[in-house]
Image: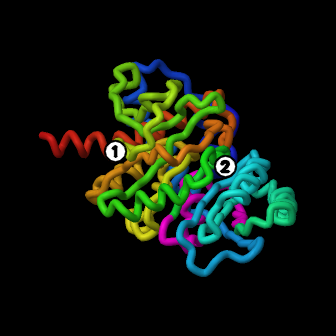
Amino acid sequence: MPQLRTPGLGSIKDLLGRVDMQHVDMAAAYDRVIGPAVFAMNQFRMEQKVTSSISNFGNVQDDVVCSIIVPLYGRIDFMEYQLAFFSRSLNPHHEIIYVLDDPPQKRATEALARSCYARFRQPFRLVTLSANVGYAPANNIGLSFAQGKYVCFLNSDVFPKVTDWLDSMVEVASNRPDVGAVGALLVFEDESVQHEGCSYEVLPELSNWTFPLHPRKGRFPTEEEDVREVDAVTGACLLMPSVLAREVGGFDEGFVIGDFEDVDLCRKVMKAGLKCVIDRHARLYHLERQSQGDQQMAWRTNLTLYNAWRFQKRWSIAEKAACS
């Protein structure tokens, strides 16, 4: 067998890329072998020292209302498109924090950042990391720099459809003390629903594990612009009070790359006695997973299953114990 790479995401991908099993064996395989192995590898990876540096482009207002945190990996050109939209619509009392989680692209990203600011004059900050850490750590590092009363975790492949999307979400959060997480109505290019809240469903074909599903995905949204309570909202666009985000520990870094971290965060919000809602006035386009890449690779499927396994261990078993 070829040797695994040095510890990091690469070695986890190598391991999971070699896994091929029947679904009937999935639960036992993750309980006994795959789960503990990936957990140990990821824990070792997260113990490695990662440094960050920050560059400011323009001046941000002192009284920041909301900090938008956008991890960048691979498609750094999405930053240009987002800033073009933001420059035409974003309230100056909001700040933008890009977190570059792709060290080899540091010089290209810094050059693009300078170009974007010269053209759009939209202030933002760029945090560059010394190593690729993944979705949860990148967002948590961005949270450590956030100055706003609220924080909005946003994917790089999400673009506003309405100009007041963020102000609307902030208004919902500020007027509803019982709400801990606010999501948006995300649509595809053809205006059909990509995300309108998550619901949980047990999938017998996947070891009876619980998965978050998008009930109205692919259907056209109704015209109502109301606020609806949901089981969870996607991390592609998730707003919450900064104090709460820090109190619950941000995203769990035990998940790897970008699956289940958002619903796990929503579970922590609900455990704190707060609700998750969708603001259907806040509408944005989402290209869906274009910011992650490698979606068809075997390791990616198995990594999603690892994150699903971790989610079951944290929440499903606890729920069964509480009901017994």
* CA–CA distance in space, label 2 to label 1: 25 Å
Whether residue 139 is in magenta: the answer is yes
Out of 74 and 37, give the one closest to the viewer: 74
Q: Residue at x 12, y 40 (%)?
A: 324
Residue furthest to the front in view is: 223
Task: Classify 278 as above or below 63.
Answer: above
Q: Is residue 54 visible?
A: yes
Q: Nearer the viewer, residue 87 or 290?
A: 87
**Residue 128 magenta-drawn?**
yes
Q: Looking at the picture, how far across and down is residue 276, in whole percent?
A: 36, 50
Element class at badge 2: loop
Q: Residues within 10 Å of mark 1 (few under 14, many from 20)?
A: some
What residue sits 39% from the left and 19% below the top? 205
The region drawn magenta spans: 126-150
Tell me which amino acid carries mark 2. Ser
Q: Position of residue 145 (x, y in %)?
A: 59, 72
Q: In the rendered view, does 186 fall on the left or right side of 127? A: left
Question: Which residue does the image show at 54% across and 51% down from the upper left?
Answer: 42
Upstream in the sequence, badge 2 or badge 1? 2
Task: Count the labels in the image.
Answer: 2
In this view, the residue in front, 199 or 84, is 84
> Callout 2 environment at 10 Å: few (<14), some (14 to 19), or many (20+)?
many
Name the outermost residue toward the bottom: 62
Checking the image for residue 229, the label placed there is 1
Q: Position of residue 24 (x, y in %)?
A: 39, 19
Numbered mark located on residue 156 in the image: 2
Residue 23: x and y in percent read 44, 20
